[in-house]
Amino acid sequence: QGTRDHPPAQAALRDRLLAAVVACFKRHGAAAIDTPVLELREMLTGKYGEEAKLIYELQDQGGELLALRYDLTVPFARYLAMNKITNMKRYHVAKVYRRDNPATTRGRYREFYQCDFDIAGQFDPMIPDAECLKIVHEVLSDLQLGDFLIKVNDRRILNGVFAVCGVPESKFITTCSTVDKLDKMPWEEVRSEMVGEKGLSPEAADRIGEYVQLHGGLDLIERLLQDPKLSQNKLAKEGLGDMKLLFEYLTLFGITGKVRSEAEEMCLDLKNQRRHQKAVRVPSLGEEGRPRSQGNSNTQLSSVSQCRFSGGLIKCVQVVLSVHSGNLSLPRACLSLQASGEKVRATETQVLVATPQKHLLAARLKLISELWDAGIKAEMFYKKDPKLLKQLQYCEDTGIPLAAIVGEQELTDGVVKLRDVATREEVRM
Amino acid sequence: QGTRDHPPAQAALRDRLLAAVVACFKRHGAAAIDTPVLELREMLTGKYGEEAKLIYELQDQGGELLALRYDLTVPFARYLAMNKITNMKRYHVAKVYRRDNPATTRGRYREFYQCDFDIAGQFDPMIPDAECLKIVHEVLSDLQLGDFLIKVNDRRILNGVFAVCGVPESKFITTCSTVDKLDKMPWEEVRSEMVGEKGLSPEAADRIGEYVQLHGGLDLIERLLQDPKLSQNKLAKEGLGDMKLLFEYLTLFGITGKVRSEAEEMCLDLKNQRRHQKAVRVPSLGEEGRPRSQGNSNTQLSSVSQCRFSGGLIKCVQVVLSVHSGNLSLPRACLSLQASGEKVRATETQVLVATPQKHLLAARLKLISELWDAGIKAEMFYKKDPKLLKQLQYCEDTGIPLAAIVGEQELTDGVVKLRDVATREEVRM
């Protein structure tokens, strides 16, 4: 339940998507590490809050108590701690496991890929954050999934907004989780939840509403820095200062503003909270948590966040891309490829070695062996005497572009007939 | 226990090894499939005989009873059955799980990679078998792990040998498992086990000894086909006939005899049994099982076998490469790379973008962004004002070959100084 096989065309497509992601991670100088799919159960305990019930546990068959990894962040933190590493840029692309209610029609699976890129170590403010957003931008562009909008925010700004709107600090977290629903429901409903369920005053809710529906670029940041109330709040001011720095760096990277299309590509969106708060248990995370980005269709394609490992010793900025399908969407990508008229081939075979008459198996074996040894992707039929029509039909069915035909005449002349399957053009060579 | 993290250099090396294997599989026209790491427990039950106790079971947390896959063959058989596919050439490179006694010093792990290549379908005798051996030959050559010897046999020949040596049919299997030990102990010990434990007559054991210590190529096959006793045995004659056909195909592939070095590369070795008998529960497998290959140091690097899925409906010829370490040996490969003087880099970074003075972060950000967008693998320090010496030292430590330096002078002149880290040669461009 909640898992699936990948048939060849889908596996080929997924490999292509993951290869694009890995190429981007490598372009940014990350090293690969690999960790076991099994972790000690105690390693995962207490790291995921309420989500802990979604961890797959292994049966006690004697020996250690084990569980399947829930993400790649906790194993990375363990790896750093075990090896006493304080400084590392690594990527890890692997499957993770969650006993979630699967919703396979919406592309939500219990076994799915995560693509993690982490910069752990010492750094000056917002430089690695900017690189992580550049990576998200590159991946989303490379995958050609259409227009996208990357929203960033700083938790300190949202907390500052709450403070200047008169929300008591004890209600910051619960108010925050209501604001988070603005992605899925209209402001009116969010407002009534704030007042009705969360007990905010209508005035406070209205004031919050004015802020959290804002989004924009450097101009908005400058305006908020001039905001008479917000500019007086220490937290908000710090957050806005870092956001300003971030947008300056993003501008140097050329990824702010309307770069590629009519869609805004990068904006400050005050309603966003940071993600992965629960993924790593760090007390200081609330204040430290920084930008988050997401896809345009309310699908969280990726997240960038800052976290601290080992009780605050190691700071870490990360990108997490979740590849369910529908998330970093395989079906969507399939559709977009189909729309572009490209057929997804299951194999990469370049040529079929074929014979038109009987008793020519030896000639096929000799030729295909030479092709393989030359690094050419080649196939042949496993029959002694296959029919030429069937061989050519197989090329058409599977998208093999060329057929290398050796018949009696070709053998006599010491040549091969190379046929372009699509045009039926033939050359002897 | 029995698992491990792969640090960057090892992960990079493993990726390179697996990439070579996958490239070979693709060269032979195989499609990739992927299956979940979880299988229904009942799917694995009864497939592995005594080894079943080594299966990792998941805790019953409600819902289906699950287990971790033990190999990639049973999931493939399930995939074919579920999708009613009778004809497929696929590869699958993925981790498998066995609660074995780990012997990590000997490179035996509980989580390790298997690289499977299977040809399932209808075919004329020995053609796919020959291709599978060609694949093993290509992979072992590509990985440059040194000389190797591929041993093949046909179970029917060994059974024929037992018959003509006077072993009762009821003792074929137990005698076979004693013969199998010839890889690890001298003939004298094997002989005394046959006589002492297995109850064969000393004469029968001696006669078996004459056969099972033979190895050679086509010449040996021809000789055995003339052998007055063996040639009268129907099973042996069929097996030898197929072996002759196989060696003819292998000769056309150019991989028989002393091709590459003094070491014999391909031989018939009568003592070999086929492998993976237990991996797929098929009654007809005993007679159907065919060639097996193995490494020269008694390490089973790979196996080629023939099996039937779905109670004999689908015939399948497969290559299985087990990548523990020490098996398809990471440490051995590391040593051989180190011996060759090649340093295994953890990253593929081509250039470090560096600055020699303060206040040049913006210049670095702009330049590195251009490099990334041009597909160049580039890194920079996450400090506003790093020291040039530290930046150059980092290049030397991590093997980055080039440094792109932007200083005040370069900015004024609109150029970049490109430095070859090894030779310290610099060009302005």
Image (cartoon, coloured by chain):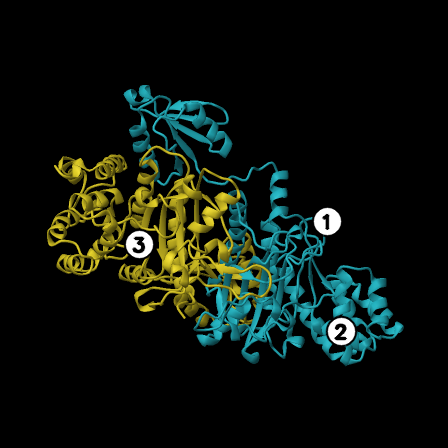
Chain colours: A yellow, B cyan
Estimate the spatial distance between the alpha carbons at disc 1 and disc 3, rounded to whole Å. 56 Å
Estimate the spatial distance between the alpha carbons at disc 2 and disc 3, rounded to whole Å. 58 Å
Q: Secondary structure at mark 3?
A: loop
In this picture, is B150 found above or below B204? above
Q: Residues within 10 Å of mark 3 (few under 14, many from 20)?
A: many
Residue at mark 2: B174
Q: Is residue B78 visible?
A: yes
For image coordinates 41% across by 56% down, the residue present is A15
Q: Chain of mark 2?
A: B
Q: Chain of mark 1?
A: B
Residue at mark 3: A301
Location of residue B381 by image quarter: top left
Location of residue B307 by image quarter: bottom right
Q: Say which amino acid is labelled 3.
A: Leu
Q: Earlier in the sequence, mark 1 or mark 2?
A: 2
In this picture, is A104 found above or below A31? below
Residue at mark 1: B262
In the picture provided, is B140 more to the left or to the right than B394? right
Q: Say which amino acid is labelled 1.
A: Glu
For image coordinates 33% across by 35% down, the residue present is A127
